[in-house]
Amino acid sequence: MNTLVMVKKLLKSLMTILILLLLSVVLLLVSCQSKLIYMPRHYEASLLRGIDARPLSYETSQGKQTAWVHPAKATGDSLVWLVFCGNGTVALDWVDYFTAPKQRQDTYLLFDYPGYGQSEGQPTPSSIKESVVKLIPALALELKTTEKALRPRLRVFGQSLGCASALMAVEEHHISGGVLIAPFTTMKDMARQVVGWPLCEVLHHRFNNVAALERLENREGLHLTILHGSADEMIPVAMGRTLGQGFPRIVSFEEVPGARHNQILHTDHVKIEAAMEAYR
């Protein structure tokens, strides 16, 4: 009998320890998930000297936001690409990327998330969406035109996390097309891949590209191109394929053989240029 009592006490103690460990992990994920998703970086003064871009500032509930118009002398008379970068880069990392002759004729609005670059606040799905919503009115004012006149010339370019922001822009500003590089399906799917179930349920930064495309799939005149590397080590190519196969009416999907998550931007630059060229 004493042995049975001791075993029960031991099992109870072990259960308590396991519960406490699980709660500790949950609390850690809840408190630190922003740091796992976002990697904000501010600009050094030296980077801003001589950069071929001019700041576009506007206000949100997070404070002053700053995007960048590239090239600095751009007037926006041709296509205007809204560029949404991944979570580990900032807007000005993209200044020298669009270098093909026809690309140099276009204007690029390089977007920084709240808390990135010179933008104030904290990045969350809601704060990013607010910044995206207020971006185009500020751009129209900067380019001395109207939103209505500007809209037909807008395109989106998103990479990784930036694909979610690009879809926000497409939805909010009725943009007709663009290029998405290595998108995920949902942030919850990403969390499930990293920490498994049920820990993925504590995620509160719930970007959802599937839901965005569901809302967009009946929009006339909309078309998006997804390029995703077969060797992507961050976001599985299966996620990009799922988006393409799930919404064939508005999405074309191309798997890029051997391309990795960030390297695809350089190893397959020509393919990306061609995808963008299709939206002229």
Image (cartoon, rainbow, N blue to C red):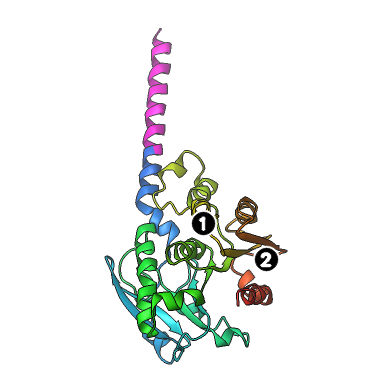
Callout 1: 10 Å neighbours few (<14), some, many (20+)?
some
Residue at the disc numbered 1 = 216
Is residue 19 positioned above or below 194 on the image?
A: above
Q: Residue at x 52, y 63 (%)?
A: 163
- Distance from Cα at disc 2 to Cα at disc 1: 28 Å
Quadrant where the image shows the N terminus: top left
- Give the quadrant of residue 10: top left
Quick check: 144 left or right of 259? Answer: left
For the C terminus, the quadrant is bottom right
Say which of 41 and 23 sits in front: 41
Count of labels shown? 2
Q: In the rendered structure, which disc, 2 or 1, sits on the residue that comes first in sequence?
A: 1
Mark 2 sits on what residue?
A: 259
Q: Is residue 151 visible?
A: yes
Measuring from the top left, give residue 225's x and y in whole percent.
62, 65
Q: Residue at x 54, y 84 (%)?
A: 106
